[in-house]
Image (cartoon, rainbow, N blue to C red):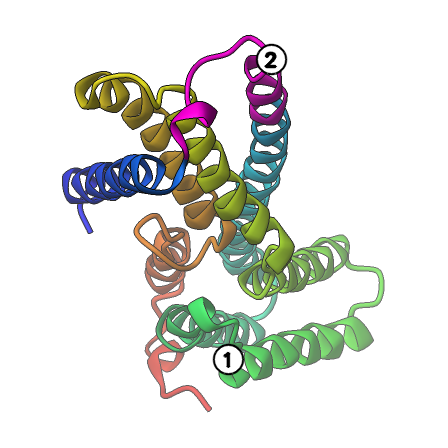
């Protein structure tokens, strides 16, 4: 969904909420309970501050999770590129085998694992490719126990595995349902309260006062929903970094044997 279309949908939802709120207040709230009395303003201000604090906290939490997932995906791709460079420090057979396994891992992540991240699923092909990388470097470690390049490569493999684990964790992490109840229910309550405070105004005056409030609350809830799941929705993290790493490995290790089918 494009940004323009999303903005129009948010505006439409805010308009509908505003219209429904005005109708309910005019239909069911007695005349004596409407109006902007001094004793009601502090209550509305207090509720608005509490709601803003909770929304700010939840949005910051969701945004942090989104950035963590994005950083983990980038670190994972950097590890693949670095390991392809480190592979050239070993013998030709080891270089070819490691390059092939890196290509298989990258393909598994991009083609098999990434489409399932929106559902919190992982790829067994990517897991198997990670295991083969550890086994390959383990064999090198038995024959070259004091090789500094091997030690650095093992650290990179561990970093790759940790980054992937973080990415998978964030794909399956959700906000507690109570937060959504508070955000949606509390937002509707504030809009209804604001409508009651302006209940004696003409309809145009009510709309001018309530629509911006409804629009801001709708945008806030939408932003939390967008950033809650980094791999789902219009702003989902894409495997761009891993695709670049795959191209880098393929170009850096041009041995034809590295293009053989993955297990």
Q: Is residue 34 above or below residue 223?
A: above
Residue farthest toward the right in the current orientation of the protein: 146
Q: Is residue 59 above or below residue 106?
A: above
Residue depicted at x 60% and y 59%: 177
User: Mark 1 vs mark 2: which is more N-terminal?
Assistant: 2
Q: Marks 1 and 2: which is nearer the front?
A: 2
Residue depicted at x 44% and y 24%: 32
Say the numbered circle drawn on residue 57: none
Residue farthest toward the bottom in the current orientation of the protein: 263
Q: Position of residue 8 (x, y in %)?
A: 16, 39
Q: Is residue 90 left or right of residue 112?
A: right
Instruction: From the viewer's side, name the closer residue of 53 and 112.
Output: 53
Q: Is residue 93 above or below residue 253?
A: below
Tell me which corner region of the image, top left, top right, bottom left or bottom right, holds residue 40: top right
Q: Is residue 218 left or right of residue 117?
A: left
Tell me the SS state at disc 1.
loop
Is residue 135 something that shows in the picture?
A: yes
Question: Which residues fall within the magenta stretch?
Answer: 30-48
Residue 81 included in the magenta stretch of the image: no
Is residue 70 something that shows in the picture?
A: no
**Residue at which label 1 appears:** 123
Instruction: From the viewer's side, name the closer residue of 8 and 88.
Output: 8
**Residue at which label 2 appears:** 39
* CA gap, disc 1 and disc 2: 59 Å
Tell me the SS state at disc 2.
loop
Q: Position of residue 140 (x, y in %)?
A: 72, 73
Q: Position of residue 31 (x, y in %)?
A: 38, 27
The reply to whether dot 1 and dot 2 touch (C-beta < 8 Å) is no
User: Could you classify mark 1 by the number of other residues whose Cα lies within 10 Å: few (under 14), some (14-19), or many (20 or more)?
Assistant: some
């Amino acid at each position: 969904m494009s940004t323009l279309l999303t903005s129009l949908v948010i505006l439409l939802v805010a308009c509908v909420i505003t219209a429904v709120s005005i109708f309910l207040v005019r239909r069911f709230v007695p005349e004596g309970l409407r109006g902007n009395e001094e004793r009601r303003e502090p209550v509305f201000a207090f509720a608005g501050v509490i709601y803003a604090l909770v929304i700010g906290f939840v949005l910051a939490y969701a945004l942090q999770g989104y950035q963590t997932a994005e950083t983990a995906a980038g670190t994972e791709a950097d590890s693949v590129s670095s390991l392809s460079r480190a592979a050239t420090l070993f013998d030709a057979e080891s270089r070819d085998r490691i390059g092939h396994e890196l290509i298989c891992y990258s393909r598994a992540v991009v083609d098999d694992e990434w489409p399932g991240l929106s559902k919190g699923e992982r790829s067994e092909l990517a897991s198997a490719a990670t295991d083969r990388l550890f086994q390959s470097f383990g064999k090198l470690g038995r024959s070259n126990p004091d090789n500094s390049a091997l030690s650095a490569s093992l650290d990179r493999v561990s970093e790759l595995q940790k980054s992937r684990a973080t990415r998978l964790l964030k794909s399956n992490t959700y906000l507690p349902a109570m937060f959504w109840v508070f955000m949606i229910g509390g937002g509707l309550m504030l809009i209804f309260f604001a409508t009651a405070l302006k209940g004696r105004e003409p309809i145009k005056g009510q709309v001018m006062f309530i629509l911006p409030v409804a629009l801001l609350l709708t945008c806030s809830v939408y932003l939390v929903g967008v950033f809650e799941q980094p791999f789902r929705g219009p702003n989902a993290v894409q495997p761009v970094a891993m695709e670049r790493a795959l191209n880098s490995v393929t170009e850096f290790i041009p041995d034809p044997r590295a293009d053989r089918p993955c297990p």
